[in-house]
Image (cartoon, helix red, strand yellow):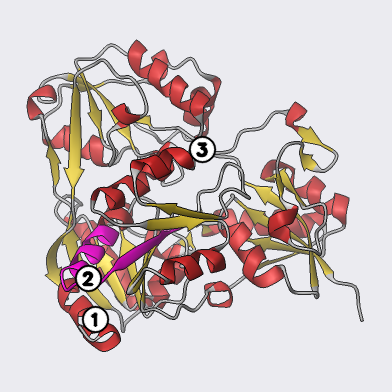
Amino acid sequence: MPRPMKVVIIGAAGRDFHDFNVYFKGNRHFEVVAFTQAAGQNMRWRPEDIGSDGFKDRRYPRKLAGRRYPNGIPIWPEDMLEQCIQKYGADLAVMSYSDLSHKEMNELMIRCNTAGTAFTILSPCQTMIRSGKPTIAIVASRTGGGKSTLSRYVCKILEEVGLKVVPVRHPMPYGDLVKQKVQRFKTYRDLAKHKTSLEEREEYEPHIDNGRVIYAGVDYEAILKRAEKEADVIVWDGGNNDAPFYEPDLYITIVDPFRAGDELDYHPGATNVRLADVIVVNKVDTAPPENVKRCVEDVKKANPTAKIVMTASPLKIDKPELVEGKSVLVLEDGPTVTHGSQPGAAGYQAAKKYKVGTMVDPRPYVTSKELKEMFAHFTHIGNVLPTLGYGDQQIKDLEETIAKIPCDSVLFGTPIDLRRVMKIEKPIARVSYEIEEAGGENLKSILQGFMKEKCGK
């Protein structure tokens, strides 16, 4: 029997682990010699962090990797991809994360080919797990398109007819991977128990507030077995613009007209557009009409059989008097304005809608190294402060930065109340937004047809 192909999985602590678990772990034709992880909002490294086998204190652990990997699997920074490939004599590099432009994908391929290895991408269909329960997937063409509000809208419609809905969220495992294998969130105490980051809380808290159990973690086969025990319907609540980990009976993709054209030019969002049963064009109330028109034309061309739904996301501020004519610091959801390539998100748009006096630029007041690096890396960010908070020190840095910035008030564009995790003494206003149908096919009617066919409701 020929030796197994040596594989490096190029990832970002999420899809990469899933692809390993369901495709490579038990496949004796392959030996995964390393993971790489992309630099970005959740990953920083210094030369002293690196040993002879990648990060000194971070590996994919033996307990998750299985018997074929008694020492676990080393993890390297993507910046050292070429060194990693050459050290292990890799035969194949597998691209395994999301929200990259096709140009960036091509550059990765060139780096791998130049380093002497082949380059490939698994199809989402090769890594989807089939559930015994009816399954709906909510995914996107780009990060920040509105998946979370759409997921909540879908869950609410299903629950109105008495179905028990269990959302399963795309992974965000930046801590102890063994402890994060299967995570179940029902109360705020569970958020503390699992030491969740701000990014995780922004996704989990709204479901908890609506009385739902939500699952996440690392091992999505084990997670599905647990979730199925208490669900009538599984809702895959996607992350970034990644494809679903579970095979959906109804595949819903949301596109964002504020980034018209990206629906066909980003990985794997363009695949999500082509695989969708339903395409939701969101934010039609605030996006330029010509952008909405282009999105509709693009998705019709790419997927002429998909049903197209138009939705609005009207923004409201609970205390508009703290914004109108005032000097305001806007706090935004981190991923949307970092790798989502947006200058601002809900807070930015709401501040303009409510006639803000000045959106304070936080950059002159930032002293923490990580926040400085974030602004240096993501140069497109406008006068907003992304909620970088993947650990206690980052949350402390964010808290100290907010305290330094002179302003009349702080506007939360995030879906959670940050005062639960940090002390903010300035006056606070909060943005709220929910999906509303605004034309095209009716999503509620589509879901009613799904429930009748799959659930007898």
Classify the position of the N terminus by image quarter: bottom right
Q: Tag 2's secondary structure? A: helix
Against 161, is 318 above or below?
above
Residue 150 found in image quarter: bottom left
Residue 137 found in image quarter: bottom left
Label 1: how many Cα within 10 Å (few below 14, some 14–19, many 20+): some
Against 171, is 205 above or below?
above
Residue that label 2 marks: 158
Amino acid on which disc 2 is placed: Leu
Q: Nearer the viewer, residue 241 or 128?
A: 128
Classify the position of the C terminus by image quarter: bottom left
Are the two marked residues, 2 and 1, in contact with CB atoms closer than 8 angstroms? yes
Residue that label 3 marks: 41
**Residue 167 drawn in magenta:** yes
Instruction: Tell how many labels.
Output: 3
Residue that label 1 marks: 451
C-alpha span from label 3 to label 2: 34 Å
Q: Is residue 449 left or right of residue 127?
A: left
Q: Which label's residue is closer to the chain start, 2 or 1? A: 2
Q: Nearer the viewer, residue 332 or 184?
A: 184
Residue depicted at x 54% and y 38%: 42
Against 280, is 33 above or below?
above
